[in-house]
């Protein structure tokens, strides 16, 4: 019986890093994760990552040798293998491909995390067969991968699709990118918590949120309060959904998408987020596009879409991903 071939896919998030080993059929057969935010610098992060990869490569009491490593990261520059001053990580600019090559003699590719999600959806998920769609990830920040006419839009420098940094409030909240009013400061797991605390300061309604210290409130706790009927928690989701719906209307006006696919921890709130989002989207979308765009929660669990997308660009059985613009390893776009 032929031994399976595996690649490693890594999804670096502002809070957690998830990694998985993927077989040649696009199945994530084993996953693990660790805290990104607990690593004090990039060097400590690489040490944690290498440790996690080692554990991942032990399958059924045997060690497997992966064919390559694909890394999905915020602010990733795929041409040079670098992560360039990500907004939610205080690393500055690092060459993560070269740092990992000190530990592994393997092809290593780096891709923007949201582009990886788009590839995962296009190759293995809801977007199979779609030519025009946008994949949005609502985690610590808000990321987007854009596919137009069957091709992943990467731009001149590989940074196309930074929709989370579209400014919606010119003098609004400070963003990790050092500008004010970016949409991800409102529509993200961290953004909705900021909204909740603004409501606590401006409203007099009784709320269980008032018992939670600032540094202990999470989007998951906010969801639990909202699901229990807490009025301020419900308002936080309503405000977030209205802003998100307007953003989606602008996205569709820009790209004429067939679908918008949503993933990330905040999407797990389900109807609490989607109901006000879809209402605002329907109100603000161009009349010519109303009713023509599907807004779909991803079928993948958190991080899995990015893992599959990142691993696919080093999968030896699929050497060319024409829709992504990546060439084979011999073509020179891997580190």
Image (cartoon, rainbow, N blue to C red):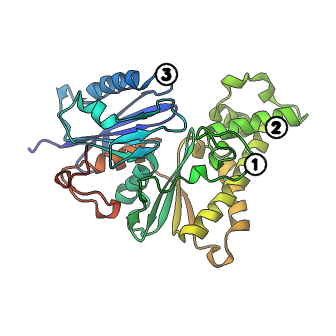
Total residue callouts: 3
Which is more foreground, mark 2 or mark 3?
3
Examine the rendered structure and indicate whether residue 306 appears above or below residue 156: above
Tell whether 146 sits left or right of 183. Answer: left
**Gap between marks 2 and 3 measured at Cα:** 29 Å
Circle 3 is placed at which residue position? 38
Name which of mark 2 and mark 3 comes first in the sequence.
Answer: 3
Q: Position of residue 25 (x, y in %)?
A: 25, 51
Tell me the CA gap for discs 3 and 1. Answer: 31 Å
Q: Is residue 204 visible?
A: yes
At label 1, counting other C-alpha atoms closer than 10 Å, the crowd grade (few under 14, some 14-19, many 20 or more) is: some
Q: Residue at x 54, y 38 (%)?
A: 87
Measuring from the top left, give residue 234's x and y in whole percent: 77, 42
Asked which quadrant contains residue 176, the reply is: top right
Q: Nearer the viewer, residue 313 or 40?
A: 40
Mark 2 closeness class: few <14, some 14–19, many ≥20 residues within 10 Å: some
Q: Which mark is residue 239?
A: 1
- Viewed as shown, does residue 150 lie left or right of 187? left
Mark 1 vs 2, N-terminal side: 2
Residue beneath disc 2: 199
x and y percent of residue 106 in the render? 19, 38
Q: Residue at x 16, y 52 (%)?
A: 330
- Name the residue rendered at 12%, 41% in the picture: 3
Question: Do the CB atoms of the residues marked 1 and 2 lie less than 8 Å apart?
Answer: yes
Residue 181 as seen in the image, left or right of residue 129: right
Q: From the viewer's perspective, is residue 56 above or below residue 253?
A: above
């Amino acid at each position: 019986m032929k031994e399976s071939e595996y690649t490693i896919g890594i999804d670096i998030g502002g809070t957690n890093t998830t990694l998985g080993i993927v077989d040649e059929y696009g199945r994530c057969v084993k996953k693990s994760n660790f805290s990104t935010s607990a690593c004090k610098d990039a060097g400590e992060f690489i040490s944690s990552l290498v440790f996690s990869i080692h554990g991942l490569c032990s399958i059924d009491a045997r060690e497997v040798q992966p064919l390559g490593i694909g890394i999905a990261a915020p602010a990733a520059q795929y041409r040079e293998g670098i992560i360039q001053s990500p907004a939610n990580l205080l690393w500055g600019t690092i060459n993560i491909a070269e740092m990992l090559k000190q530990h592994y003699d393997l092809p290593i590719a780096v891709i923007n995390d949201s582009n990886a999600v788009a590839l995962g959806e296009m190759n293995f998920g809801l977007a199979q067969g779609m030519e025009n769609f946008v994949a949005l990830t609502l985690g610590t920040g808000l990321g987007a991968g854009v596919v137009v006419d069957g091709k992943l839009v990467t731009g001149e420098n590989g940074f196309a699709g930074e929709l989370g940094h579209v400014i919606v409030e010119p003098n609004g909240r400070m963003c990790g990118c050092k500008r004010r009013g970016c949409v991800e400061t409102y529509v993200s797991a961290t953004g909705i918590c900021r909204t909740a605390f603004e409501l606590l300061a401006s409203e007099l309604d009784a709320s269980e949120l008032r018992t939670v210290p600032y540094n202990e409130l999470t989007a998951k706790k906010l969801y639990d309060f909202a699901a229990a009927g807490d009025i301020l928690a419900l308002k936080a989701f309503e405000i977030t959904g209205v802003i998100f719906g307007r953003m989606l209307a602008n996205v569709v006006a820009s790209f004429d998408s067939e679908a918008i696919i949503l993933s990330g921890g905040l999407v797990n709130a389900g109807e609490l987020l989607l109901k006000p989002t879809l209402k605002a989207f329907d109100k603000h979308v161009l009349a010519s596009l109303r009713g023509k765009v599907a807004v779909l929660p991803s079928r993948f669990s958190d991080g899995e879409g990015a893992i599959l997308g990142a691993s696919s660009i080093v999968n030896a059985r699929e050497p060319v991903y024409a829709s992504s613009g990546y060439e084979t390893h011999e073509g020179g776009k891997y580190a």
